Amino acid sequence: MGYGVMAFATLEVHQGHGIAAITAHLRSIPEVLEAHTTSGQGDVLCRIVARDHADLQRVLDAITSTQLVARTSTVISLTAEVPYRVAQLLDG
């Protein structure tokens, strides 16, 4: 599909707006494949894709274009050692 970069972005969101507002914003960005509310350091963990590193910056700019996001921390996936899988759950 042409998306050679996968990354995980942890978002810290401004409190008081509720999760629905940030969820709607993230759903409007096609490159956000998943978003999970989390415990710990951040509030939302997103799996995102981009065409290249410059495009990743564009996607991150889209994510932070709202006042709902206070800060992001992003890590780029180098390899998928265990890709997404569920078949083994059916075998057990």
Image (tube, rainbow, N blue to C red):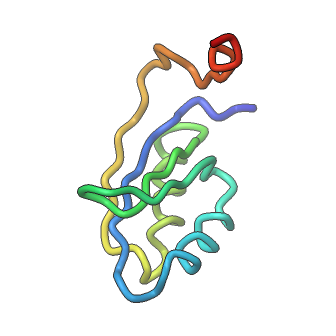
Q: Is residue 56 above or below residue 5?
A: below
Q: Quadrant of the C terminus?
A: top right
Of 11 and 64, which appears nearest the observer? 11
Q: Quadrant of the N terminus?
A: top right
Q: Position of residue 58 (x, y in %)?
A: 52, 57
**Image quadrant in which you'd find residue 50:** top right
Residue at (63%, 20%) from the top-left corner? 89
Of 27 and 60, which appears nearest the observer? 27
| Left or right for 74, reference 8 | left
Q: Position of residue 38 (x, y in %)?
A: 39, 56
Q: Position of residue 34 (x, y in %)?
A: 59, 49
Residue at (60%, 52%) from the top-left corner? 32
**Image quadrant in which you'd find residue 76:** top left
Residue at (46%, 40%) from the top-left corner? 7
| Left or right for 2, reference 55 | right
| Left or right for 88, reference 1 | left
- Spot the residue most to the bottom: 16
- Spot the residue most to the right: 1
